[in-house]
DNA sequence: AAGGATTTTGAAAGCACTTTCATTTTATCC
DNA sequence: GGATAAAATGAAAGTGCTTTCAAAATCCTT
């Protein structure tokens, strides 16, 4: 006989042959219960392994700390690597890691509405997602320390990277290598709820080209949905232009791999005939020998957690805005 | 008239001009409430400074709405993809996803000791990790429905893949393609706490070669730590042999990429001079045009969750052992 | 514009206990 | 032995919240 339910006072009452009132009283004011009855109830409690108070459960919930992470659904490897940094920093601490993946704008809004109330969290990391002032206020009024990754907000701690500078870095490098016909390939399907660092990268990229008086024809700026096939296709179009670029800056490593694939299929040699620079420095960038702009993804997650924990430990600490440096990692593709 | 009582949902409901049902719903499933109504309720909550009482909540809620996942620390992309499947299946269900990453055997043992007691979970998914009979019993005695991924246990539901068959598949394919000098490259740094499917893959691989009377010299079976550089190095050794293999079966896609890199550096053309077959079919396999054995990673996670939820809904259901089929995906490398 | 499907909503019935209040038992006193 | 106070007990009404179910409102189709 499976006693799968946790016993309640009803079970105890039945077992002891008394009413629930008596059991309850026995728990709260034992002196108001007859001695013999008390013994019977006590016996029943022992036999059933009854744990008084559902409150015990609520307390148990509070026992270990809980850190929540709101993240876009992990399609992009960059989210995963950030998450990895978060997880790494957290396992050392005695905190539970609760993941909330968001798949739409309203989904995100829902989280903001309910998490502060029912989430029971000690702290929150919001990854690569925007947050409105109203929601910031809500988090604050519920005393939930929060740190943002990749999205700045003056009232909260943030770990940011300078995407504009990253775009500049890539452009400068390619120009320095002698390229004059440089194309940009970014992703387009910005879900309406997500932030879009790629356009910042384009801004920086544009700036440098302009400063160097290098023309950037509009058909050299291409956006493709964030999938392997579509990126490859757009890259192929770029490479089949009568005057194809000699270098492509892909706004994410993932897309850089698509460019590489297109080049492979068209028998274009990299880096001799085509230079490719990516952005992110994912794990796989090293496998692909991809020259790329490194933003230390794991580190961003780790850092976010550290800031958060110090904030939890001492809520009086002011919010910090941290800018992670970007570096260019020179490998084989440019 | 100062209402010094702490506000309840009744107050919120009244203030927002809705029923308590709607307030409760807004707290727990905001997407089921109209947008305008939600705003009104949110406003009322803020004005009243309402905080739901955890104790009452725990009482009315019979379950905690939390699913735990114990996973090896996500170094390998395959873990991540499984996790992704889990997350996908869970967000639809309004369950919280709690992640426990394990980094050592004792770490894992700690989890087994504490999770059943303090975790208050409705269910548990254990990913690619072994579990002892004692721990199975512990989980059972605490009534925590559990499903295992990639590790079989007669008393629990499992989602397994047939690694031996996978090894066979790869070998058969390569033989069919005319190869007779086929090497195996697996990973070695089996952390003592993890399971090691790779050796099963080798078993299947060996079987087929033996059946086909194809010799497998011992120096054709190589194990390398699961890092890019070391894999590449071992692959290079293999390729620099006086009689190098004409095909390599890499026991994971990640390592297959290392092989590809080694070939690239040695100017060995793939697949003309060297065929490479991987295992997993990670996202990036497609980018690399890697021929590989597909185990539907996302699907395994999704499936595990489905089994778990059905088990939670009806605990009388018997444990199921599910074997996911493997297929060979033919791309450009073999 | 009708008809069906879907989304939003609220009334009411839990949940696991506590409390109030009425009832029964027992002890006490003359 | 009967009246009375005290002690022991239980029925039932809260507690703050969730959930089921059915009605109402809104959205599509044709």
Image: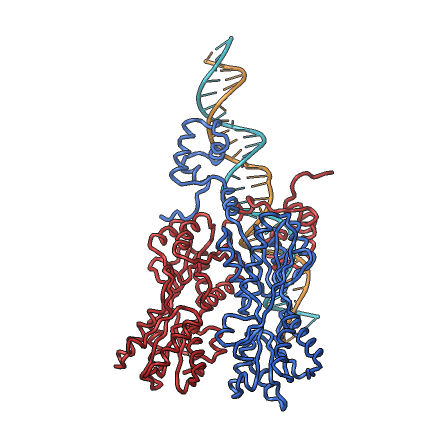
Chain colours: A blue, B red, C cyan, D orange
Q: Residue A52 at what x, y percent from top left?
A: 47, 39
Count of number-bearing discs: 0
Q: In the displayed structure, would residue A215 be above or below residue B117?
A: below
Nearer-the-camera pick, C25 or A50: A50
* Residue lying at the far bottom of the rendered structure: A242
Measuring 70% from the left and 54% from the top, which residue is drawn there?
B40
Which image quarter holds the C terminus of chain B? bottom left
Q: Which of D18 and C4 is in front in this view?
A: D18
| Vertical placement of residue B21 versus A259, above or below | above
Q: Where the N terminus of chain B falls, by quadrant?
A: top right
Residue B53 occupies quadrant: top right
Q: In this view, does C3 lie to the left or right of B264?
A: right
Residue B278 position by quadrant:
bottom left
Instruction: Using the rendered image of the protein, determine whether residue B92 is visible from the camera's viewpoint.
Output: no
Instruction: From this view, report whether residue B191 is shown above or below residue B263.
Output: above
Q: Which residue is drawn at 33% across and 69% down?
A: B199
Whole-percent x and y of residue C20?
58, 31
Look at the image and tell me whether residue B275 can be seen: yes
Position in image of residue B101 (x %, y %): 46, 58
**Residue B29 in picture, x, y percent from top left:** 59, 56
């Amino acid at each position: 006989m499976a006693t799968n339910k946790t016993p309640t006072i009803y079970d105890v009452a039945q077992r002891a042959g008394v009413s629930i009132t008596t059991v309850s009283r026995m728990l709260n004011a034992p002196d108001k219960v007859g001695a013999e009855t008390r013994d019977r109830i006590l016996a029943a409690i022992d036999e059933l392994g009854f744990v008084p108070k559902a409150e015990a459960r609520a307390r148990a919930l509070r026992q270990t700390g809980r850190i929540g992470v709101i993240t876009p659904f992990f399609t992009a490897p960059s989210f995963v690597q950030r998450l990895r940094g978060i997880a790494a920093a957290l396992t050392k601490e005695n905190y539970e890691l609760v993941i909330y993946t968001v798949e739409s704008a309203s989904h995100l809004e829902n989280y903001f509405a309910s998490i502060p109330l029912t989430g029971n969290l000690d702290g929150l990391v919001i990854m690569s997602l925007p947050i409105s002032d109203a929601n910031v206020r809500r988090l604050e009024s519920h005393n939930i320390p929060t740190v943002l990754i990749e999205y700045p907000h003056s009232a909260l701690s943030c770990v940011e990277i300078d995407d504009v500078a990253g775009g500049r870095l890539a452009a400068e490098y390619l120009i320095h290598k002698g390229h004059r016909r440089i194309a940009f390939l970014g992703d387009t399907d910005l879900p309406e709820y997500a932030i879009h660092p790629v356009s910042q990268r384009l801004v920086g990229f544009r700036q440098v080209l302009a400063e160097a008086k290098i023309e950037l024809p509009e058909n050299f700026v291409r956006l493709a949905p964030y999938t392997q096939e579509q990126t490859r296709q757009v890259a192929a179009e770029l490479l089949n232009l009568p005057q194809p670029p000699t270098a492509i800056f892909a706004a994410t490593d993932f897309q850089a791999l698509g460019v590489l694939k297109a080049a492979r299929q068209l028998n274009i040699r990299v880096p001799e005939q085509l230079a490719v620079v990516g952005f992110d420095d994912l794990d796989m960038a090293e496998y692909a020998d991809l020259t790329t702009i490194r933003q230390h993804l794991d580190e961003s997650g780790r850092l976010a957690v550290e800031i958060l924990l110090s904030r939890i430990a001492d809520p009086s600490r002011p919010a910090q805005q941290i800018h992670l440096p970007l570096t260019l990692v020179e490998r084989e593709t440019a």
